[in-house]
Image (spheres, grey):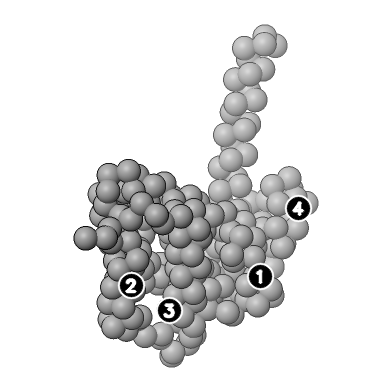
């Protein structure tokens, strides 16, 4: 077999592996979101993906790793759906806009809702360090720094520290919005409008350049 053929074969196998890994995550997100960590069997997930449980270890070392990756993937998708439309949003409106869009998308992400709502206590400790939330912090710092350069916001704000604080606010409010959500017969109320209004006013006052 030529070197070119070997490389083509390797690329094909890698692509198939990526598809298999993505399929496992999709099934894990669905089942963990519906039944929870303890009631979900890795055997059921791998069987539905057309794999043996032994074969699944090539992609995820154990159930805990599969759950962790499923949570992060679902949170990534949730946050991306709330931040992607905001490329042109003024930075002083960014936080409340993210929160409004997150609230609108929550029901599409039952696993994220389950974890953020405290129904998976084992996963709560990992929330703050989820790569998905770290990416949001980096995005916010970049947007804030660019707004400083154009004079849109105060020049004396430490944008890295502010972005970290905003990440905590987002996580705290997401937790508030998801408590009780997804339980049978018990839908959670949306964040009250006065809370969003208060966030808008505080965020704007914090960033507004001095007159």
Q: Name the residue under label 1.
A: 125
Asked whether the viewer can see residue 18, the reply is: yes
- Counting residues from the N terminus, which is met first, the one under dot 3 or under dot 1? 1
For the residues bearing labels 2 and 4, Cβ distance under 8 angstroms: no
- Counting residues from the N terminus, which is met first, the one under dot 3 or under dot 2? 3
- Counting residues from the N terminus, which is met first, the one under dot 1 or under dot 2? 1
Left or right placement of residue 181 versus residue 55 in this view: left
Residue at the image point whose x is 33% and y is 72% from the top: 202
Number of the front mark, 2 or 4: 2
Residue at the image point whose x is 41% and y is 86% from the top: 187
Q: Position of residue 99 (x, y in %)?
A: 36, 68
Residue at the image point whose x is 66% and y is 70% from the top: 125
Q: For numbered disc 1, what is the local secondary structure?
A: loop
Q: In which quarter of the image is the C terminus?
A: bottom left
- Counting residues from the N terminus, which is met first, the one under dot 4 or under dot 3? 4
Q: Position of residue 59 (x, y in %)?
A: 69, 47
* Disc 2 residue crowd, few under 14, some 14–19, many 20+, Cα 10 Å: few
Q: For numbered disc 2, what is the local secondary structure?
A: helix
Seen from the viewer's position, the closer of residues 181 and 149 is: 149
Asked whether the viewer can see residue 45, the reply is: no
Q: Where is residue 204 in the image (x, y as percent from the top left)?
A: 29, 66
Q: Quadrant of residue 1?
A: top right
Q: How far is mark 3 from mark 1, CA to CA?
A: 18 Å
Q: How far is mark 3 from mark 2, CA to CA?
A: 20 Å
């Amino acid at each position: 077999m030529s070197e070119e053929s070997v490389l083509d074969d390797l690329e094909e196998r890698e692509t198939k592996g990526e598809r298999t890994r993505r399929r496992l995550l999709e099934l894990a997100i669905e089942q963990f979101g519906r039944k929870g960590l303890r009631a979900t069997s890795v055997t059921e997930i791998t069987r539905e993906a057309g794999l043996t449980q032994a074969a699944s270890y090539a992609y995820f070392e154990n159930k805990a790793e599969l759950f962790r990756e499923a949570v992060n993937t679902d949170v990534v998708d949730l946050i991306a759906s709330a931040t992607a439309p905001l490329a042109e949003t003024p930075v002083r409106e960014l936080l409340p806009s993210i929160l409004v869009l997150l609230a609108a998308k929550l029901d599409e992400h039952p696993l994220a809702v389950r974890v953020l709502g405290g129904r998976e206590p084992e996963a709560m400790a990992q929330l703050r360090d989820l790569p998905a939330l770290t990416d949001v912090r980096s995005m916010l710092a970049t947007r804030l720094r660019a707004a400083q350069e154009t004079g849109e916001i105060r020049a004396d704000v430490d944008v890295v520290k502010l972005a970290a604080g905003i990440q905590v606010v987002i996580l705290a409010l997401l937790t508030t919005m998801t408590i009780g959500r997804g339980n049978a017969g018990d839908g959670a109320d949306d964040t009250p409008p006065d809370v969003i209004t208060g966030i808008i006013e505080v965020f704007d006052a914090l960033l507004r350049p001095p007159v």
